Amino acid sequence: MAGNQNTFHLTIASVGETRFDGAAVSATLPGASGELTILAHHEPIVTTLKPGTITVREADAEPKQFKIDSGILECSESRAIVLL
């Protein structure tokens, strides 16, 4: 990820399981107040997530999708963490 200004580090995890841990170009999530997309250098945010699908886009790969029931998103600096 070093040197790439268009990515951020994304971790999607629950107790005992890491679903994604790596560089992402974007992540679209089902926020409690509506869908939101996180990009590199996003403003700090903490929000709850509602049931839906997280779509992660990596630089040179097909988008990955993760169905969730609920969770919390915390985004700061060049890192985003989703706890399910």
Image: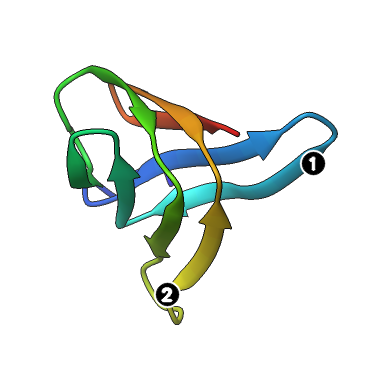
Residue 7 located left or right of residue 81:
left
Name the residue located 79 percent from the left edge and 41 percent from the top edge.
17
Name the residue located 51 percent from the left edge and 37 percent from the top edge.
70
- SS type, badge 2: loop
- SS type, badge 1: strand
Give how far apart the Cα atoms at labels 1 and 2 are: 20 Å
Name the residue located 31 percent from the left edge and 29 percent from the top edge.
78
Name the residue located 22 percent from the left edge and 41 percent from the top edge.
40
Name the kind of residue labelled 1 in the image.
Glu
Query: Residue 19 versus residue 33: which sits nearer the camera?
Result: 33
In the image, residue 22 above or below residue 57: above
Query: Residue 84 versus residue 43: which sits nearer the camera?
Result: 84
Residue 82 located left or right of residue 55:
right
Residue 74's x, y, as percent? 38, 22
Q: Quadrant of residue 3?
A: top left
Could you tell which of marks 1 and 2 lies nearer the N-terminus? 1
Q: Residues within 10 Å of mark 2 (few under 14, many from 20)?
A: some
Q: Which residue is mark 2?
A: 63
Name the kind of residue labelled 2 in the image.
Pro
- Residue that sits furthest to the bottom in the current view: 62
Query: Residue 84 versus residue 9: which sits nearer the camera?
Result: 84
- Res. 2 visible in picture: no
Residue 80's x, y, as percent? 40, 31
Q: Which residue is mark 1?
A: 17
Residue 26's x, y, as percent? 29, 55
- Res. 45 visible in picture: yes
The quadrant in which the C terminus is found is: top right
Query: Residue 67 versus residue 21: which sits nearer the camera?
Result: 67
Residue 58's x, y, as percent? 40, 66
Residue 33 located left or right of residue 11:
left
Q: Residues within 10 Å of mark 1 (few under 14, many from 20)?
A: few
| Tags 1 and 2 touching, CB below 8 Å | no
